[in-house]
Amino acid sequence: MNLSAKIETSLGGEPFVALIEGSVGPFHAPERNRLVFATEGEHSSARVLVAHQGVIPIPPDLSYLGVGDIVRVNPVSKEIRVLYRRASRYNVLFFTERCNSRCLMCSQPPRDIDDGYLVEDILTSIPWMAKDTPELGISGGEPTLLHDRLIDVLSATKDYLPNTALHMLSNGRLFCYLRYAEKLAAVKHPDFMVGIPVYAATEERHDFVVQSQGAFEQTCRGILNLGRLGIRVEIRMVIHRETYRHLPEFARFVARNFPFVDQVVFMGLELMGFAKSNLEALWIDPTDYQNELEEAVLEITRSGIPASIYNHALCLLKPTLHSFARRSISDWKNIYMPECAPCELKEKCGGFFASSTVRYSPKLTPFLPETAQTNS
């Protein structure tokens, strides 16, 4: 599944955000921000989107579009990008490509550009989103670099989507400034959590992974500030060749210093961006760090903090870790390898990122009927 595609259109004018509505009202978006499905011609079944400015043929890559979805149309670059899918549980509000870290394995390498329009698109979209949307992600880049515009988005989601959970990914560094953390807390969103990565128990190792001196201290202070203000925090650890040896030490550090966090997540690599560029230095077969991962997970759970494992195939984990594994990869980039075809537990398995075709473990062992029941 793709979230953007080229379009054939003669529309003129500036880029615009639009809600796909039914052909019969009531309509929720102004006419200039409204798209309606139609057929291409009297004797054709091909679908098109009728806009205020004209007709947009739907690219094959976006054939899944439906009523309630929100898109951004750029007539100049002839691109349509999906901002929100009504039927999906994996919607993410992408804030910015800018970041104040430069992590070795970043799947979305930062760019120092002016992309403030992204937040404006988000603020336009939020009132049109379905009121029963279960969850929205917030990501980047680093969302906190938008400063008060982040607060504006949190306030808008609280007002328009009061029953929607928000989960924001952030490096947490700017929350070392208590006043900014207090602004976040003042929104009083009823279901908000911040996922913050900590990659080591020491400043030297963490700062090396994020390629930013002083980041470890800022991140730790940020987590403590959020904790004291009652904002829910999830700590994330991405496992690769530079972090796996120190997983038990990391777990002990978290348990002793951040016992108030809601969850600790151990994550597999997404082989995009810098992770792909640094593949030889970072990639390690998951079966080669199972002992360290098991010790770390047990350390976290013994401390009373819930632990989860994301982005891992079940057959590459020790059986003792299966109960901690979650299906975490967004549906539009979640795949299974050919070796997985006969597996009886595929519906329970996290599978792989689409980018994992670059490299994945040769030790995949699908669960067949005689083994699936004992490992389910």
Image (cartoon, rainbow, N blue to C red):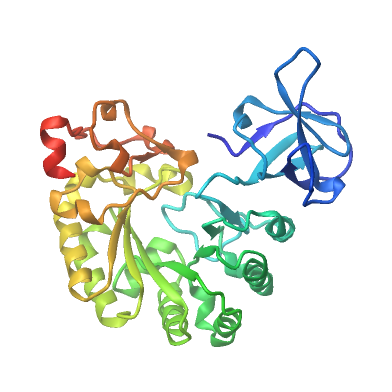
**Is 367 rendered above or below residue 265?**
above
**Is 217 rendered above or below residue 105?**
below
In the image shown, does 78 or 234 lie closer to the viewer? 234
Q: Using residue 291 as the reference point, say whether residue 223 is left or right of it.
A: right
Q: Position of residue 351 (x, y in %)?
A: 33, 40
Q: Residue at x 79, y 48 (%)?
A: 27
In the image shown, does 220 or 131 lie closer to the viewer? 131
Q: Tell me the quarter of the picture where residue 58 sits.
A: top right
Q: Using residue 159 as the reference point, say whether residue 239 is left or right of it.
A: left
Q: Where is residue 70 in the image (x, y as percent from the top left)?
A: 68, 46
Q: Position of residue 67 (x, y in %)?
A: 67, 40
Q: Which of the image's four quarters has the C terminus? A: top left
Q: Using residue 171 as the reference point, say whether residue 208 is left or right of it.
A: left
Q: Which residue is drawn at 68% across and 74% down?
A: 148
In the image shown, does 221 or 190 lie closer to the viewer? 190
Q: Residue 205: tell me if it is visible.
A: yes
Q: Position of residue 248 (x, y in %)?
A: 19, 66
**Looking at this rendering, what residue extends furthest in the top direction?**
43
- Count of numbered circles on the image: 0
Q: Residue 77: tell me if it is visible.
A: no
Q: Using residue 90 as the reference point, say whether residue 359 is left or right of it.
A: left
**Is 48 rendered above or below residue 81?**
above
Q: Which residue is drawn at 32% across and 52% down?
A: 326
